[in-house]
Image (cartoon, rainbow, N blue to C red):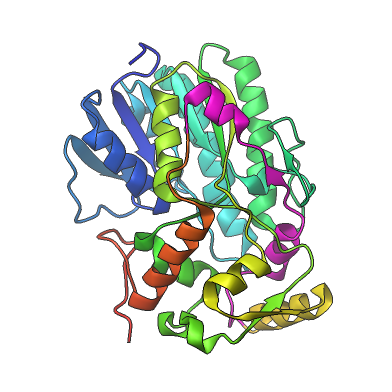
Amino acid sequence: MSSAAGSRIVVTGATGNVGTSVVRLLSEDPGTESVRGLARRIPDWSPPRTEWSAVDLASERADLVEEFAGADAVVHLAWAFQPTHDPATTWRTNVLGSLRVFDAVAEAGVPTLVHASSVGAYSPGPKDHAVDESWPTHGWPDAAYCREKAYLERALDTFERDRPEVRVVRMRPAFLFKRESASEQRRIFGGKFLPGPLTRPELLPFLPDVPGLRVQALHTDDAAKAYVLALRSDARGAFNLAAEPPVDAELLAEMLGSRPVRLPRAAARSAIAAAWGLHLLPASPHLFDAVLRLPLMDCTRARAELGWHPEHTASEVLEELLQGLQRGEGAATEPLRGRKAS
């Protein structure tokens, strides 16, 4: 392990989808001296060499400098996806909270910052070929998630200019799923009106095929391995993370034994907008617009510089997610709590 990697790691958002995987891998790594997990609610989960702090990044009272004191690296994962109807609230947590994290990293003298960016930070791009990390990161401005991720990319540009002594890594993963996050994903994207059992393939004889709906997916544990590899290296800069193959209606239909049926973008968006407007669906039509425009990512840099290779294909990731949805899978943290499938 290089001296830049360190062995005392602080993880924000440590009880979420990515955080639980990162904390688990670090706690199992003999090169880790200690992990401090920051979360709004302390979980009933006690991995080795891990301690917890109850911290709300949206609160100006949070003493992040004290939390980061003596750390060799901060992995910043904390993120609020909801409420989608109140972007000012997510801005306070996601943007203002992240800026507090960046400032505290500098003030506490932490030498390494690994930040969770996203494919959502990218400007609209191609669906027929992949782009590398040089693709513009201006996001899709109408979607709060993309707007916030893109803003933080600019904030990190300034941070790196002003704090060259801090090694900054930006992870830009595709959509991240694992079995233990299935219930959380249902709550974030489908809401309470999408019970897990409704995801059974036999109940989906037809699958909407919306033009442009071609995205990438990745198992959360595979993303976590990239974070740990980045900590154990001297790498800097941005890294795309995704598994093959790209996910579209044809792939999903084959997995589910369904028949893809072409649905115009306008019709799909109108249905999503109506459900969102009635608070029946938490995922906004603005995010749908963004997803249709996300580029496919080339992950050559992560493979070449980090030695990273995903162990799961995108098809395996989606199969695991579907099984988790059907069974109401979760984990022993508040964000990932499961609900027993009926």
Image position, residue 75 (x, y; %):
42, 34
Q: Quadrant of residue 270?
A: bottom right
Q: Which residue does the image show at 41% across and 28% down from the upper left?
A: 229
The part of the chain drawn in magenta is 279-308
Position of 260 relative to 4 (above/below)? below
Image position, residue 70 (x, y; %):
30, 20
Q: Along the horizontal axis of the image, is 203 left or right of 231?
A: right
Q: Nearer the viewer, residue 73 or 48?
A: 48
Q: Which residue does the image show at 55% across and 30% down from the upper left?
A: 302
Residue 14 seen in render: no
Q: Quadrant of residue 138?
A: top right
Magenta-colored stretch includes residue 300: yes
Position of 259 relative to 139 (above/below)? below
Position of 257 relative to 105 (above/below)? below
Q: Along the horizontal axis of the image, is 110 left or right of 340?
A: right
Q: Nearer the viewer, residue 82 or 133?
A: 133
Q: Quadrant of the N terminus?
A: top left
Q: Quadrant of the C terminus?
A: bottom left
Q: Nearer the viewer, residue 175 or 153?
A: 175
Q: Along the horizontal axis of the image, is 242 left or right of 285?
A: left
Q: Nearer the viewer, residue 60 or 283?
A: 283
Residue 251 seen in render: yes
Position of 112 relative to 154 (above/below)? above
Q: Quadrant of residue 196?
A: bottom left
Image position, residue 341 (x, y; %):
33, 81
Q: Which residue does the image show at 59% across and 87% down from the upper left?
A: 205
Magenta-colored stretch includes residue 40: no
Q: How many marks?
A: 0
Image position, residue 121 (x, y; %):
67, 44
Q: Which residue does the image show at 75% across and 71% down from the upper left?
A: 210
